[in-house]
Structure formats: C-alpha cells, structure tokens
Amino acid sequence: MSIEEQIAEAVRKVVREEMAPLFSARDLELLTADDVASLLKYSDRHSVYKLKRERKLKAVILGDKTIRFRASDVRRFIEEREE
C-alpha cells in the first residue's frame, strides 16, 4: 500500500469515528467529497460539489479530476453556519 493510500485510509477511519480528532489535530488533512458528505450528513458527494461550485466551500484541485477539501475549510464552513 502506498503512502497516499495509507493516508487516505487513515483519514477515512477518522471520518468513520465522527471526525473529532481530525478537526483538533489534523486541519491540513485533505478529504474527498465522499468524506465531506459523510461529515455533513449529506446523502451523496454531489451536494459537496455544488457547495464548491457556489464558492461556499473551498477546494484543492490536485489534477484534472482530483478534488480534495481541507478539513480546516470544512470546519470553517460548519462554524459559519452555527447559530
């Protein structure tokens, strides 16, 4: 397993464990749209891509079809919507 795959698996594990450790210690981690959708309790990644298109959520473009989201940006998105 490559280092990239190991990192991705580690991030997915944190996502499954409710994301608390990620936000406190790993704000530079990059998340997939599926990871973000899971975190935000969205039914699919298409809603995440819509947030990106509407410029409500920043994204990191790594290649032609590779888009990731910083955990810190997702946290900021959530915090901006708290009442």
Image (cartoon, grey):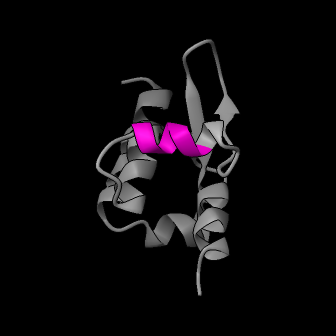
Q: Note whether 32 is above or below 82 in the view shown.
A: above
Q: Which is the main secondary structure of the residues drawn in magenta?
A: helix
Q: Note whether 63 is above or below 70 in the view shown.
A: above
In which quadrant of the rendered image does the C terminus lie? bottom right
Q: Residue 9: x percent and y percent?
A: 36, 41
Q: Is 44 on the left or on the right of 11, as rendered?
A: left
In which quadrant of the rendered image does the N terminus lie? top left
Q: Is residue 50 magenta?
A: yes
Q: Residue 23: x percent and y percent?
A: 56, 68
Q: How many marks?
A: 0
Q: Can residue 77 be seen from the camera position used here?
A: yes
Q: Residue 82: x percent and y percent?
A: 58, 81
Q: Is 12 on the left or on the right of 7, as rendered?
A: left
- Magenta segment boundaries in residue numbering: 46-51
Q: Residue at x 57, y 36 (%)?
A: 68
**Residue found at the very far front of the displayed protein:** 54
Closer to the camera in the image, 56 or 70: 56
The quadrant in which residue 39 appears is bottom left
The quadrant in which residue 64 appears is top right
Q: Is 50 on the left or on the right of 58, as rendered?
A: left
Q: Is 32 on the left or on the right of 43, as rendered?
A: right
Closer to the camera in the image, 15 or 3: 15
**Residue found at the very far bottom of the displayed protein:** 83
Q: Residue at x 66, y 39 (%)?
A: 59
Closer to the camera in the image, 26 or 36: 36
Q: Residue 46: x percent and y percent?
A: 41, 37
Q: Is residue 31 magenta?
A: no
Q: Can residue 11 be seen from the camera position used here?
A: no
Q: Residue at x 47, y 38 (%)?
A: 32
Q: Residue at x 59, y 58 (%)?
A: 74
Q: Note whether 39 is above or below 18 in the view shown.
A: above
